Image (cartoon, rainbow, N blue to C red):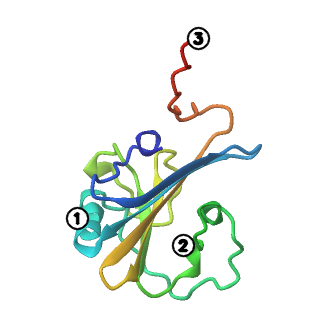
Amino acid sequence: MSGHMGLDVPVTARSVQAAYKVTSRFDTGLLTFTLTRSEAAAYLKKHPPSGKWLTPTAAQTGTAPSDFAHFGLPEPESFKDGMLYGDVCPGAPDDALATDPYDTSDENCTSLYAYDYAPDRTRIYLRTHFEPGVSPLPATPVAPSPAR
């Protein structure tokens, strides 16, 4: 999934989980992992947002479990404290990044949420949407068939 999104997963990441959901309206790619706070700061610096990092003014307490519930995690929109978020557009030239943090017109952008859930740990949530039936599905490793 990281290759499909154009974003790397650091080798030091823990609890790496990915999913791809196909729907009639749009497909959704999900990726989540944890890093130490210093590793997360380096990751966010390496993958800057289009615009600037945002902090929520309030937690969306009524957020229904949806995408990340598949992993047994709360949705990133349900957090207020310790949360940064923004749209990361891998492959976009630095001078072409939009200044509007709410611009979702770039199909190559991924929503990145960084949540400081423990004193020295940060969970990275990545969510991106793809056109249904147009985007190639991520390749899944295929186990070799047993010899007969």
- Residue tagged by mark 3? 148
Please tell me which of labels 2 and 1 falls first in the chain. 1
In the rendered image, which residue does mark 1 sit on? 42
At label 3, counting other C-alpha atoms closer than 10 Å, the crowd grade (few under 14, some 14-19, many 20 or more) is: few
Left or right: 142 as drawn, with respect to 48: right
Residue contact at pointers 2 and 3, CB within 8 angstroms: no
Which disc is residue 76 wearing?
Answer: 2
- Residue plotted at (29% across, 54% down): 10
**Gap between marks 2 and 1, in whole Å?**
20 Å
Amino acid type assigned to the residue bearing label 1 in the image = Ala
Left or right of 57? Residue 54 is left
Give the Cα separation between the discs numbered 1 and 3.
49 Å
Residue occupying the point 38% across, 83% down: 118
The residue closer to the viewer here, 101 or 54, is: 54
Position of 144 relative to 5 (above/below): above
User: Going from the N terminus, do you reach mark 1 or mark 3 first?
Assistant: 1
